Image (tube, rainbow, N blue to C red):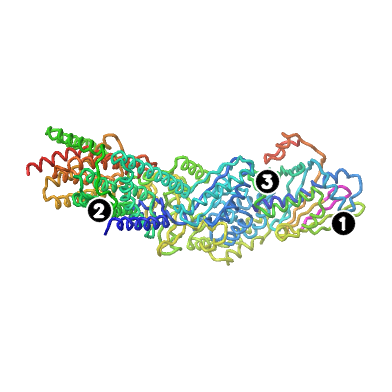
Amino acid sequence: MRRARSSLVALLPILWVICGGDSLASDASGSAPTELEALMQRFASSGGVRARFRESRHLSILTDPIETTGMLYFAPPDRLARHTTWPGRSSVVIDAERVLLGDETGQRVFDLHSSEVARALVGNLMIVFRGDLEALRARYSIAFDSNAESWTLDLEPRSRALRSVIERVHFAGKGGNLTEMETREPNGDRTIMELSEIEVGLSWGQPELDRIFSVDPPDTTP
Amino acid sequence: MNDLRVRWITFALLAGVGLYGVSHLEFTNSIKSFIPAAGELGDLSLELVDSPLARRMAISIGGGEKRTSVATALAESLRSHPEVAWVESGFDEDALRGIYELYFARRVYLISEKPEAEIPALLEPAALERRAAGLRRSLAQPDSMLVARTAPEDPLGLFQRIVDRIRDAHPALSSGSGSFESASGEHAIVLLGLRSSPFDSEHQAPLLDYLDSEFARLNAEAGGQMVLESSGINRVSVASERSIRGDTNFISAVSVSVVCALFLLIFHSLRHLAIAILTPLSGFAVAMAVALSGDNPVHGITLGFGFVLIGVAIDYPIHLMNHHALSPPGTLPRETVAQIRSSLLLSALTTTLAFVALALSDFPGLQAMGTFAAIGIAVALAVTLFSIPAFMSPSAVPTPAQHALAHGFARLVGWLGARDGLAVALFAACALIAAVGVPQLHWEDDPSTLIVGDPALIAESERVRARIADFDSGRFVVGLAPNAEAALVLNDQIHDQLAQAIAAGDLEGTSSLHTFLWSQALQRRNLEALRSVPDLAGRIDRIFVQSGFQSGAFRGFSAAVAAPSVAPLRAEDFAGTALERSVDSLVELEGRWAVVTYLRGVRSGDAIRRALAGLERARYIDQKEIVAGVYQGYRHSMVRVLALGCVIVFVVLQLRYRNLRAALLAFATAGLAALATYGAFGIFGVSVNVVSTVSLLLVLGMGVDYGIFTVDGARTSDRLGATLSSILVSCLTSVFVFGTLALSEQPALRAVGLTTGTGILFALVLSPAVFVMARRIRVRE
């Protein structure tokens, strides 16, 4: 379950990005939201999302960051897939209460029921989907800042269990675009993800959904 | 003492012991009662049969996506049941954290089973290069956070080796979902421990009922598609007990009914029936009270066997009342008693001695049966002699049936007497049956066949066990040592040598404590092997830096090797963790320590023994094999007991008659009937077992009764009809009683019924011939 929890931790910033992707991309030509409430409302109205990601993991034991690239998919209300395509192929899929992992070593399934932290992570993300700012504030210390061109959102978990996994999640955007997202862990390790080619408001048929949200990643972009 | 007082005293005593029996009634159906003392291996085997290792159940829930949530809810519900010691349905986050904390700090102790060879190989440059590249790849995975966090202190992935070892040993219970699943992933698994013995039906039956009702509730909430299956000795035990209880009720009802019907037919009187039934009831009640006064519960089979007292003990009032009815008018009951007292005493004495021989058996279960019957017969005789006359009417008139039977037998004996060869031919026929059939007898020495389980239940249990890759019940290796550490050292060796048996295909797998815990000696050897690698830190650093790792990133590991933060793992460290049950297989037994390795898929016991060669304190135990061997030996012993019983009975008869031919004739009914019974079984292919042999003692006891009455009857010409008609009624009651035992689902009771019923029929056929020959001897004298 630690692996499942770790996977969710890795996905947390992605979910945030995707949740906000619709709003941010759809408002790309406009100004950045000046209020957190407005940002949350945009999160709440997100639809199906597809984006290309590039991730850099800065680990204290490595001289260079580990770079990965791949595709992210989100289908409301509770399906998310991350398919890494380089340097190796692997997938993480969240489907309601289940987390599926797949790589060259095989597939693994995790049940969120058995992990308080994992359940809390997903539950918190659902709060974001709903745009439930009150519940979000109950779980995180929130720092939101914006000016006419950019905004930042910093979240710090209130629960000790979550804080042992994530120290802080930092989002930064310009206008309606997300420009940077960083997850910082208590040991100083950082994960920075950049998103590009974000498409929002997508809807897929059942065969496509089954293919995308499986640990056998789609070979071609649907 | 007048008759009224005798009646009241009889009723009062019967009521007293009856109430005592009912209020103290407690019985068991443990197979342990049928396993004799069998030396070290047998004793060890018996101790483990009822140890905490056997006190567990596995529950499987299938039928759809909701199986896991139903299993989790069921586990939660069971947790509060007083009979449940522990429940596991998966490893939650706290459990996993506990396992992490147990092993991560001790990773330097648990690297290899052959540390001196494997640890240096693990730290060869090429091996380190592969490890560094692998670690780098792992760090690129989306779920690499744990690896990233632990890598500075564990660059060699030692903790993961431990986790993999546990996962490999228990694939069915290592699903990533956190919940226990079957190997196919189609069933959720719940394991639970029992506080009481699985043979303790008083506690197990309510638990199983609770389990069923809770599952029914949860299944209804989940849509009704779930299917629960389970395995556990307690299920078989409770089902067997219910079967025995049902059999006992059935047998007793049929026995009583048949005896009642016969009584009404012969005596035309319900009063006679009520009086006669007092005898076996008294014998049964007193024997039961004595049995329940001990520390151990009465075995269900002993109780069932006790009902045969109805068939045996009712013979005495039958003889008394039949003789009294056929006595000259005006004869008082106590006068009739005086006339046949010596016959009654002798027959009861020989029957009691036959059961005493049974009570001297090495089998606890058979001892109980023998004691029960011996007490019952003695009490029945006492009641017949002292109480029954007080209930009988002073002047009895024979019924037409009694008249007809008495005259019929008189004519039959006359007819037989006129044909010299016929009586001898009857003896010869029985002897021929014995001579032809006995050499063909098939002996069944598997004691488990004495108690049958529901086939559907056994099949269900096997399915569940297959889902969790459970070990073979009754086959294990036990290492014995004076202390826990010595036991663990031995267990390391056992594991190593059994691994070779697995590699050779002699064994499918093992369930060993070694998966979770090694001896402190082996753990220390691991640390020493690690420390003896020259420049360990520098070697790791140089090679990992080449793969892009920071120089000095693994100082934590070097520090852990130099000074581990904790001592090697001990059994006590598992207390309170999710793996607490794993160390149940290390048990203290009467001052010594035993460590048990369960086996799966044993190809042959000899191969396992060969695999354990050189380990003097390691024993391969196949409970079935051991007990079958013991039973085989006991079978020979039982035959000797039977022979001894024959000798004792014959000596008693000789003492009574002081005439060899009369004694031989009195004994011939029983001896030939017993031999002819086994002869018939041999001819018809009926397997016999220890219980069948014991049942021959019943044939011997009752057959001798008939022989005594026949020989005594032949000595007094006026009692010819009364004697033989009494024997016929006695025989019929016994045959019907034992016939119903033969209908029992329990093989042990069935064997008693079949053997005894057949033997008594032979005795009945032989009785007129014995009478004719006894009379001939009498005439010559």
How packed mark 2 is, by other alpha carbons closer than 10 Å (few <14, some 14-19, many 20 or more), is many
Residues under numbered marks 1 and 2 in contact, where contact means CB atoms less than 8 Å apart: no
State which chain disc 3 sits on: A
Q: Is residue B335 left or right of residue B115?
A: left
- Quadrant containing the C terminus of chain B is top left
Q: Which image quarter: residue B38?
A: bottom left
How packed mark 1 is, by other alpha carbons closer than 10 Å (few <14, some 14-19, many 20 or more), is some
Q: Which residues are the magenta region?
A: A168-179
Q: Identify which residue, B453 or B383, lies in the foreground.
A: B383
Q: CA distance from mark 2 to mark 3?
A: 80 Å
- Whole-percent x and y of residue A93? 70, 44
Judge depth for marks 3 and 1 and give the one in front: 3
Instruction: Say which residue label 2 marks.
Output: B385
Instruction: Say which residue label 1 marks.
Output: A145
Q: Is residue B773 left or right of residue A217?
A: left
Q: Main secondary structure of the magenta part?
A: strand
Checking the image for residue B508, the label placed there is none
In the rendered structure, which disc, 3 or 1, sits on the residue that comes first in sequence? 3
- Quadrant containing the N terminus of chain B is bottom left
Q: Identify which residue, B760 or B156, lies in the foreground.
A: B760
Judge depth for marks 1 and 2 and give the one in front: 2
